[in-house]
Image (cartoon, grey):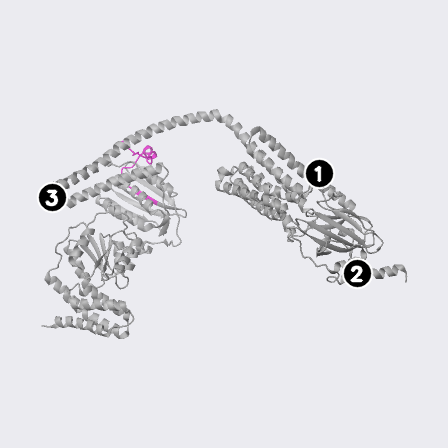
Amino acid sequence: MPMKAVLKLFLYCVFLCFSNLAPADTLAPIVYTLKQQDTDLLGQGHVFQVTSGTFPRNHSEIEMWLEDKQPQSRTSFFGGSFWFVIALENKTDLDELVLYPYNTLLSKIETRIYDISNFDEPIKQYVTGGLYPNEFAFHYGNKVKLAPNRSYVLIAKFQSEYFYTPPKLVLSSYDDFFVRKTSDNMIMLLCFGVGIALGLYNFLIYLGDRDKTHLYYAMFTACWVLAWSQFFHIPDQIFGFYNAHFHWLGFTLIPITNILFFNSLLKLKDTSPKLSRLSIYLGIVATAGAPFAMVWPGFGFIWATLVTGATLSLGMVVGIRSWISGFKPARYFVLAYLAMAIPNMVGNLTNLGIIEPIKMDLYLLGLIGTALDAVLLAFAVANKFSILHHQNVELTKNLEHKVKLRTQELQQLAEELRDASEAKSRFLANMSHEIRTPMTSIIGYADGIILGDIQPHERNHGIRVILQNSRHVLGLINDILDMSKIEANRLEIELVETDLFATIAEIESLLGKQIRDKGLKFKVDYQFPLPDWIVSDPTRLRQILLNLATNALKFTTQGYIMLTVSCNQKQLIIKVEDTGIGMTESEQKDLFTPFHQADSSISRKYGGTGLGLNISKSLANKLNGNITVFSVVGRGSEFCFTMELNTTEHTQWVNTFDDIRKPQTKELFSNNSQRNLVGRVLVAEDHPENRQLIKRILERMGLTVVAVENGRDAAQAAMDESFDLILLDIQMPIMDGEQAIKIIQATGVTTPIVALTANTMKHEIDRYLKQGFTDHIAKPIDRSCFSSKIASYLDIDICENIKLPDEEFALLKQEYIKGLNKQKDTLVSQFKQGDITGFARSVHMIKGTAGMFECKALYKQAVDFETNLKSSPDAFDIQQVEALLNAIDVILTVKKAP
């Protein structure tokens, strides 16, 4: 058999052996042409774990060498090593190619090429990597000889402490490789040159003007030049120094230098102190990882990726923020960050396999982006100082003019201060008069009461005079305090849900009577649609409207005062119109000036401090609104108050007055000092005879009484009228006392509310007080205790004897006894139906009424029965039921007896 045929048979057997070492076509030869010179061979061949570090010594050992090799699916960026095996058949006309590993950092790549077409050919060995001199400047790679139309097995051992990105391996023609890498080297050197030149330039500028922006820029460029130089092996290529532990030092220092730079460039400490502090903390944390990155390069890769990504994101935020705020150099800053972010993002997405691989070296792409970033940042610095220079020139040109204007302003300010001083002097004189007048009455009546000059029956009048004048002085003090807060910029508002119609109704309630008593007409004109609830400060809103309405009342002697309420999509509009004395245009200009009144004679004739309108306007501004005035002398004035309209989630738009919800039509009293105690009492009691008895007792004490039969009617009455005291029974039909007090208090009523209850256990009383009841009165009523408590809340003397005349009490008792028949029938029906809850409620009612009408035996049975029901609420005690019914029968029998 010819020698050539024997050789071909042997090669066929070798390939059969190789095919059994791994999945099908493991070492099937790859036909290599020039069209494939950009193809990543690592994706075409096979990667194995390194268990033994030796290569096959000759062609015949390849089969045995492959037997114990296990596939390796991926590399670890913490370092390691792996075998790469591929069979190639050179189908080009070239016998000299370049084997080029790139896109990674490697300590050593050792390659051996076995010519399986001719076993007599010696094994070719090649070495490249960071630890060895490379054939090509700044690049890995070896020039290899592969004869055309011959088959080879290529075995390479990749070793590294840091597989940061998946390696790529291409086989390229020497001419193409030389042209491409020469271009890459020029780009690389240009990028480094730009960085070094700009860094040195800015450092020299810093030495001249000591502006730290230039220093931080120089530090930033130094860090990124150091960082990227490791990836292109510049230290070992130029200085013969190589150490993997320095690869991430520059990248871990980039965040702190970059953060210091943009803090200075964008004046972040002044424009956003919080972002400035956050960025500094980030820079400190990033720098703290530098020692660990030097010890463990794999950690350095993760750490640098995280901190540079965080710095880049934060820088974009502050850059865009500064750009939007009008700082023009920030536009270069944002573009610089985009130039650095986009190439690195492309590299990361390529490494992750999300986008298709590109031919260009990803490290070179990242270097280009960083260099472009440095150039654009240099533009930002230059633009900033160009703006500063222009501002300085303009400042110099306009300095004389500004000094002149400032002199004029100081002269005008001096005149205003003189006017303000005169106004305050007038104010103090006026205030002295305003305070001394009511204090004269207060001191005079107080001395009279103490010395006995005022008779006992006149004391209540004297006390009312003292109270009224004290409230007047308190109002003056409150105005002064509000004015002081306004001048100190410490007047605060509290925005809450506010009942618009209730607020207007309160103004009408507080001032309507005073206006009508003066002989004026008063009207509130609602121009629908209007929101029922708005977001505002109800206290300040009332204060504004009271000031405007009181001002109209003060200066109007005939005609009318009218409030007009309307709104548009953005504003609530309330106008206060009067037919008073009016004002001239010059008087209107200074109307809202503190301590000012339209005419000095006004304070003597009408009184007042001159603070009300100024305070009102300041409050309106706090509510995002304003107060304007239109006035004609002799015809009256119109004050227009506007405020920003904000509605709530539950706001309803009211189209007619009938649509206004009931709770909004009540008369509110946010401050009891706004009305006098005149002895009006509201009583809610479901039992008619009890209700009549309590009403008559109160009337004998000289009080005006409104009596209702359930909590719903009590709540309605409290909203429709004003009372000085409210007595609520706890257990009532339709709505009980506990439900009623919630509604009454929710509408803003601050009248004392006393619980009428037959429940006298301490824990029950405590519960009522926590719900808002001011006090409680136990049933049956103790007349002496009842009189004392009522008198303590009202401006009346304690009645020594409030007992009704015998005839009147007997008639009420007869009506009560008549009703016992119906109560007995109810009890029997509830007992037969097993309605324990209803039965207990009926017993409680009897307990609360029997004692009131001196039915002591029935009262005692009801008390005992209720006590047992509370201890055993699930069953009737038959004997006690019979005893209770018998006690009712005894009363009914006595009534029927002749």
Name the mark on residue 15.
2
Name the mark on residue 616.
none
Type of residue at label 3?
A: Gln
First reached walking from the N terminus: tag 1 or tag 2:
2
- Return the x and y of residue 56 as percentages of the image width and height: 77, 55
Q: Which residue is mark 1?
A: 238
Which image quadrant: the N terminus? bottom right
Type of residue at label 2?
A: Phe
Q: Could you tell me which residue is drawn at 19 percent across and 72 percent down? A: 883
Instruction: Give the answer, above or below, for where 154 lies relative to 635.
Output: below
* Region in magenta: 574-601
Q: Could you tell me which residue is drawn at 49 percent across and 38 percent down? A: 271
Q: Left or right: 695 with respect to 5?
A: left
Instruction: Give the answer, above or below, for where 204 lies relative to 877.
Output: above
Q: Left or right: 372 with respect to 869?
A: right
Type of residue at label 1?
A: Ile
Q: Which residue is mark 3?
A: 455
- Return the x and y of residue 507 as percentages of the image width and height: 28, 47
Dot 2 crowding, Cα within 10 Å, few <14, some 14–19, many 20+ = some
Callouts 1 and 2 close, C-beta under 8 Å: no
Q: Nearer the viewer, residue 19 or 357?
A: 19
SS class, disc 1: helix
